[in-house]
Image (spheres, helix red, strand yellow):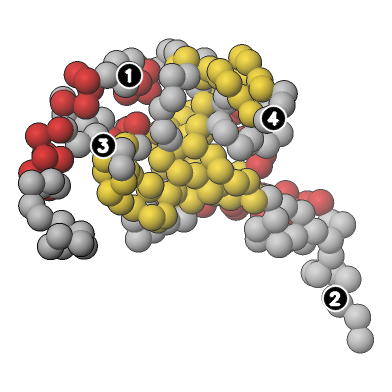
């Protein structure tokens, strides 16, 4: 027995286009508007193969479906030596054809950003999956993006979208930043020295010392 050559075919482009159109319609009905911000490499370290300096100067609005329906995934909030670190993760799905139409590029790249106005946060793309669902009638229709909350590191951000640019205008590492209210969009919430002193009291006797 062989597969049905009239229905189960991987070469019938009209059926493939129909599924692609239904995917786009579904995302537009149940998704959210995102702003895709591509990364431009300004200076690259050829030894370690990493970007030393990069900029974000473009913005493209495109609809995406949020797969993380139960909220942000990832490690969440955790206390580190640098303060309260936020490691929210977001998984989204975007149509391949719509992405090409709106951005002019064939696929998202790792390191690019997607901004969600609903929560006023930018997420960095960590992985791009292009094989889900697996070959519907012989064609891939979507990209699935695994992203994490963007941690600002002195990149040049001038997209022309005020909601994005304002989040990173005053971000700098200084004593004033540490003492002021935290900016969650950076991914790290600093803890002031006053709070740290109340949490860690070095005047108490060390129970693990020999003199205790």
Q: Is residue 33 visible?
A: no
The part of the image, by quadrant, that contains residue 166 is top left
The location of residue 130, given as percent across then percent down, is 68, 50
| Label 1 crowd (10 A; few <14 / some 14-19 / many >=20) | few
Q: Of label 2 and label 4, which has the lower sequence position?
A: 2
Contact, mark 3 vs mark 2 (Cβ under 8 Å): no
The circle drawn on residue 49 is 4
Residue that carries the numbered disc 2 in the rendered image: 4
Secondary structure state at the residue bearing disc 2? loop
Q: Of label 3 and label 2, which has the lower sequence position?
A: 2
Secondary structure state at the residue bearing disc 1? loop
Is 84 displayed left or right of 14 in the figure? left
Q: Is residue 76 above or below residue 112?
A: below
Residue that carries the numbered disc 1 in the rendered image: 172
Q: CA distance from mark 1 to mark 3?
A: 13 Å
The location of residue 183, given as percent across then percent down, is 25, 30
Query: At 72% from the left edge and 23% from the top edge, which residue is drawn?
Result: 46
Is 138 displayed left or right of 83 in the figure? right
Q: Of label 1 and label 3, which has the lower sequence position?
A: 1
Mark 2 or 4: in front is: 4
């Amino acid at each position: 027995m062989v597969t049905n050559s009239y229905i189960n075919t991987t070469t019938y482009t009209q059926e493939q286009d129909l599924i692609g159109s239904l995917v786009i319609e579904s995302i537009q009905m149940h998704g959210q508007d995102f702003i895709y911000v591509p990364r431009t490499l300004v200076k690259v370290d050829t030894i370690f193969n990493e970007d030393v300096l990069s900029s974000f100067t473009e913005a493209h609005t495109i609809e995406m479906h949020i797969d993380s329906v139960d909220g942000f995934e990832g490690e969440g909030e955790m206390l580190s030596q640098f303060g309260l670190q936020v490691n929210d993760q977001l998984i989204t799905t975007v149509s391949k054809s719509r992405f090409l139409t709106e951005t002019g590029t064939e696929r998202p790249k790792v390191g690019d950003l997607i901004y969600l106005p609903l929560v006023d946060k930018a997420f960095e793309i960590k992985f791009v999956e292009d094989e889900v669902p697996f070959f519907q009638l012989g064609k891939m229709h979507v990209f699935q993006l695994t992203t994490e909350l963007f941690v600002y590191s002195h990149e040049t951000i001038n997209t022309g979208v005020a909601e994005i640019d304002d989040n990173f205008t005053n971000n700098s590492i200084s004593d004033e930043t540490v003492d002021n209210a935290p900016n969650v969009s950076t991914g790290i919430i600093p803890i002031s020295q006053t709070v740290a002193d109340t949490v860690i009291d070095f005047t108490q006797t060390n129970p693990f010392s020999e003199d205790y």
